[in-house]
Image (spheres, helix red, strand yellow):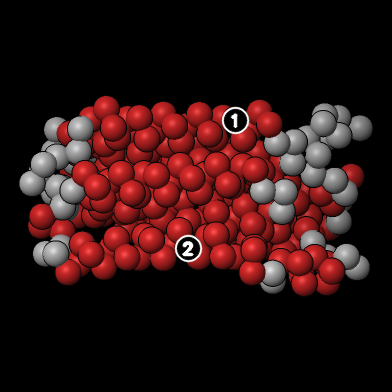
């Protein structure tokens, strides 16, 4: 499975390089999403399917949606329409689409060739992670909940300031 | 099935971390700096998962979940701060936003 790892790692590095060199925020977000999907593929090949699923759901899903919403909120203005036509050019989306297509082909090849059982030397599944998470790492989960609560309170407070127009 | 060598996985993590650091240092737009920070946190998570896979233990994935929690809370607070800064002085330039008060 070394070839699978190499392809996914190459896509991750390439997409990250493209991300930090794009002038437009939306183009950078497209490449960042592809990079996160490639890292999820790396996790899958490494035998960590639960981490791969979390990477797709939380990083490429929730956090990217937050970024997209903020980019939308910051682009309210007259020049937004001119930018919109520029964003819809094929050169904007053909690169991320090509890299994502490579990742999809890789996933399809994995599924055809026998799936997860053959990808890694040892697969650490969701069950093992869950047992460890609710056993010896219970305190870490509590600390993470404190952190999330603090983040919710801070985001609410700052969001109220935005609403008041400070 | 052959396992992935440890140095390859850690090399990927180091490359992603270096790219994220370069992004933070080179870009002056706060949105891009936050995205590069995400890349750096993600690279740390990659290192954890690679090490966990090397010894076939669940601990690496648990540390990855904690890094994920931290990244989610960091990005929510960071994006709220970015919105506030944009509302105040209508620019996202990090060099223009150095007056934290007044």
Viewed as shown, does residue A27 lie left or right of A10? Answer: right
What residue is pinned by disc 2?
Answer: A98
- Give percent across and percent down for residue A33: 50, 56
Residue pictured at 88% horizontal, 65% vertical = A79
Name above or below for residue B17 compared with residue A59: above
In the image, is B61 to the left or to the right of A143?
Answer: left
In the image, residue B55 above or below residue A73: above
Query: Residue at (15%, 52%) from the top-left corner?
Result: A119
- Res. B59 image quadrant: top left
In the rendered structure, are the residues bearing label 2 and label 1 in contact, judged by CB atoms less than 8 Å apart? no
Residue at horizontal 71%, vertical 66%?
Answer: A87
User: In which image quadrant can residue B77 be found?
Assistant: top right
Which residue in the protein does label 1 denote?
Answer: B22
**Observer-nearest residue: A33 or B84?**
A33
Instruction: Give me the C-alpha separation between circle 2 and circle 1.
Output: 25 Å
Eyeballing the image, is B44 above or below A134?
Answer: above
- Above/below status of A151 relative to A64: above
Element on which disc 1 rests: helix
In this rendered view, identify the residue nearer to me: A134 or A122: A122
């Amino acid at each position: 499975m070394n070839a699978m790892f190499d392809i996914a790692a190459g896509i991750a590095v390439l997409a990250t390089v493209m991300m930090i060199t794009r002038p437009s925020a939306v183009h950078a977000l497209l490449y960042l999403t592809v990079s996160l999907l490639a890292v999820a593929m790396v996790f899958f090949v490494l035998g960590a399917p639960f981490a791969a699923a979390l990477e797709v759901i939380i990083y490429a899903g929730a956090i990217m949606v937050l970024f997209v919403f903020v980019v939308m909120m910051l682009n309210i203005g007259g020049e937004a329409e001119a930018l919109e036509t520029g964003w819809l050019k094929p050169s904007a989306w053909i690169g991320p689409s090509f890299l994502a297509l490579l990742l999809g082909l890789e996933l399809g090849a994995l599924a055809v060739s026998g799936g997860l059982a053959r990808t890694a030397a040892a697969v650490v599944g969701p069950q093992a992670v869950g047992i460890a998470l609710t056993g010896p790492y219970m305190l870490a989960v509590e600390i993470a909940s404190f952190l999330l609560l603090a983040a919710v309170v801070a985001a609410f407070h700052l969001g109220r300031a935005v609403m008041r127009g400070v | 099935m052959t396992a992935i060598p440890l140095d390859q996985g850690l090399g990927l993590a180091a490359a992603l971390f270096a790219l994220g650091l370069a992004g933070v240092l080179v870009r002056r737009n706060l949105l891009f700096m936050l995205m590069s920070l995400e890349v750096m946190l993600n690279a740390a998570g990659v290192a954890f998962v690679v090490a966990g896979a090397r010894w076939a233990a669940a601990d690496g994935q648990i540390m990855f979940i904690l890094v994920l929690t931290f990244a989610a809370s960091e990005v929510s607070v960071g994006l709220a701060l970015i919105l506030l800064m944009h509302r105040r002085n209508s620019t996202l330039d990090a060099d223009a936003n150095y007056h934290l008060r007044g």
